[in-house]
Image: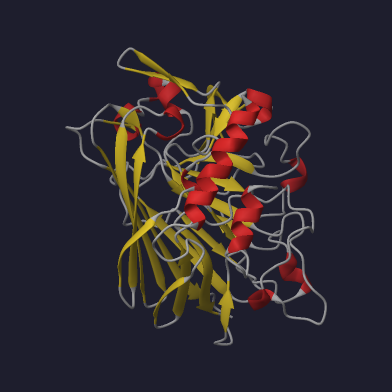
Amino acid sequence: MLLVYHFLRFAFLLIVRISAQASPFSKYTISAPGINASFIPYGARITNLYVNDKDGNAQDVVLGYDDGMQYLQDTESVHTYLGPIVGRYANRIKNGTFTIQGVTSHILENEHNGENTLHGGIAGYDQRDWTVVSQNATTITFSLLDQAFEGFPGTIITYATYTVSPNQWTSRLVSIPLDEPTPIMLANHVYWNLGAFVSPEATTVLNDTLHMPYAARAIQIDNIEVPTGGLEIVNGTFLDFTSPMQIGHNISNAHQCGFNCTSYDNAFILDRPRYSSPEATDLSVLTMSSNATGIQLDIRTNQQSLQIYSCNNMNRTIPVKSSQQHGSKTTYVEQYGCVVIETQQWIDGINYPEWGQDQYQIYTVDSEPAVVFAQYDFSVIAA
């Protein structure tokens, strides 16, 4: 079975490389006042995002590689999921199985020695060569036809549109089922460092301030980070970011992130205010800022959960991009050198119908499309 997998992986990568369209590792750049963003078709992935700091200098605030081919090498080695869309189902599925309308599907497990599926299986959306269908100075659209990839039921087509406007990046992911009922939960898997590695302080995000005013609950997980079905109140715990808090303030107590782990890798539930709605996009659900650069990020989304991962597994083996090298010595990404923010629905909600997530995670040919809207606003914090 393993030999077959490696053969199929080689064949897939060969097809990607000889594709008739432009290289899947070539950059496409869009820009607007105060912002400049680059993407590659491999995973419909963001590779660079420049915004202005407190001194008016453009800083690249997302992690990645200088050479597009390095993303392929990353996939074949450490597989960090730097910057792509993950799917067809983001995050984890317990035992790689789920049942929809009496039909059970099994997706090959690719994490924890076969205990669960992560980010869509062995070859998820992050490894697919998306097609560029439209581009102008401020927007680009990719598409992907998923013909039952990895054993997910049915065929779906997804359009990913990225747009920049002054000091703002907007991501819209629209997925349409074409035949069978299927779970759909996509997410942008962006690694952030708002400090852009400009100083020793900014080589980690521990001093950055994080605020999630509506994240009053979190999903309980076991020691391989799979939901148990339980939900918990975060008030007074290390998970409490309902008031602004430095990421490193309580991280020494953050042990709910898998076996023998000290970090954040948790799914926070967004309980919007009483007179709002579950999918309202008029409120900032997350604010994060760095004193090193003065850059502040505000996120608005229609999703009902945020997965926060504070890069516990980074270990100074990945160099930061040339745009983020600010000294005479090469800077490498160290533990806690970044934070991933995934806007998504409740993880593994397809296996917990009591959560009431089916309408947000299971789609059919006669349902509305699955839409993930996320808007990233950049500003400078007051001096």
In the image, taking residue 374 as reference, residue 236 lies left or right, namely right
In the image, taking residue 38 as reference, residue 201 lies left or right, namely right
Residue at (35% x, 25% y) in the render? 356
As displayed, is residue 17 above or below residue 260? below
As displayed, is residue 349 above or below residue 252? above
> Residue 91 at x, y = what percent?
52, 37
Which quadrant of the figure has residue 201? bottom right
Q: Nearer the viewer, residue 89 or 265?
A: 89
Residue 213 visible at all: no
Residue at (56% x, 40% y) in the render? 9
As displayed, is residue 203 above or below residue 361? below
Which quadrant of the figure has residue 59? bottom right
Which corner quadrant holds the C terminus? bottom right
Residue at (46% x, 45% y) in the render? 125
Q: Nearer the viewer, residue 186 or 311?
A: 186
> Residue 160 at x, y = what percent?
35, 55
